[in-house]
Every structure is written in structure tokens, then in C-alpha cells.
Amino acid sequence: GEDVEQSLFLSVREGDSSVINCTYTDSSSTYLYWYKQEPGAGLQLLTYIFSNMDMKQDQRLTVLLNKKDKHLSLRIADTQTGDSAIYFCAESSNSGYSTLTFGKGTMLLVSP
Amino acid sequence: DVKVTQSSRYLVKRTGEKVFLECVQDMDHENMFWYRQDPGLGLRLIYFSYDVKMKEKGDIPEGYSVSREKKERFSLILESASTNQTSMYLCASSLRYDGLHFGPGTRLTVT
């Protein structure tokens, strides 16, 4: 079945770049997503990438996709304390109903 | 912006009670979803719906049912709540592949 793996924790200093990594198993995934969850809140969609792309940039966020290795990363430039949150990687299934399979999330802690 | 609202942020119920969790979206999205989120287990799909009166089981449907009588509203029903259903419940909606848009979540405690 489909599986999405992420490292559990990342700690960086304010102003540094953060890179959160994700691997997935379903080679038929058409879209891959990054979500952010702040404490006590729902998930906020940050960005997504179509599987025929290898990079997407949106302001401070850069998504890199290596389809051969089934590896996805999210780079946050100039990380701020407000970026501290849990980040989830997700892949779309091929069911046609846009269901997603989520990783367990990476907790990003940004220290001043 | 898409708005997904859930009827309660926090809910406390007793074992055996029937529990209704309501979700409403305002963007005419076809697809709606219920997930539960637990520490160490991540998000798990309970049920989803791709049209009015249509429903599909997700990965963990046991102990739950759903209702979608109107396009904008998707209800999750716990027929007889049990303590192992204590969790954060997240509703989401989507229009094809632009991603799921989540509500703020309902933290349910069953005592």
C-alpha cells in the first residue's frame, strides 16, 4: 500500500534555511503536497507540485521533487519563529477522488 | 478563500452516547473528507464523499458512519462512542487536485 515517511523533528536557528524531507512509495502519485499545522489548529495547505515537475518556488518556499528516488523536500528560506509548526507531506492516490495519504509530520522548532 | 467550519472545537461525551460532528464548506466543493489525528499515528482517513448522498469508506471506518444530504455539509456520526474514539477530528473539502482544505478540527474526549 501507499506509505509516506518523514523525519520526526528538525531544529534550526532563526534566519537559517530549513529543509524538511519526505519519501513516498506510490510511483503513480500525481500530486504531492505540503501542509503546515500550528498547535490546536487544522492543517493549512502550503503548496503542491505536480509529478511531472521537479521544482516549484513560492516566495520563501521551494519544493524539490526527485521522482526517480520518490523523494520530496520543502525548503524554507530565512526561517522565522512563526514557522515553528508541524509540517506534513502528502501524496494523492490514483483513485480519482483526490484522497491523500499523509506522513506523520515533522515538527520544526525555530529558536531565536 | 475556502472556508471549512466544524460545529465544535471541543466536545466531551460519555461512553455509549451517539455523537454528531458537523462540517460545512462554502466553496461548492464536490469532495469532503473526515480524518482523525492521533499522536504517533498521524492522520487517518475515516470516510469521504464525492457527491451528495455518496460515501466511501476510508482506512478506519469501523465505529463511524457519515451523512451527506447537502453538498456543503458532511456529518460524521459515532453511533455509540467509545474511549478509543477520543481524538482530534478533522474535516476537509476539495475540488479535484488543488489539495484538501481543512477545518479547525474538533477535539473529542469520550469518558
Image: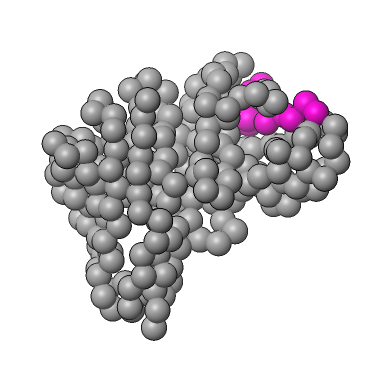
Q: Quadrant of residue B75?
A: top right
Q: Is residue A103 above or below residue B19?
A: below
Q: Residue at x 42, y 51 (%)?
A: A105
Percent coordinates x, y for residue A100 in the rendering: 41, 34
Q: Is residue B43 above or below residue A42?
A: above
| Direction top: furthest residue | B54
* Of the pair A50 and B83, the residue shown nearer to us: B83
- Which residue range is magenta in the image? B68-80
Magenta stretch, overall SS = strand
Q: Quadrant of residue B37?
A: top right
| Direction bottom: furthest residue | A112
Magenta span includes B72: yes
Q: Residue at x 54, y 19 (%)?
A: B56
Left or right: B77 as drawn, with respect to B34: right
Q: Quadrant of residue A103?
A: top left
Percent coordinates x, y for residue A19 in the rendering: 26, 61
Left or right: B25 as drawn, with respect to A49: right
Magenta span includes B73: yes
Q: Residue at x 28, y 43 (%)?
A: A23
* Of the pair A18 and B101, the residue shown nearer to us: A18
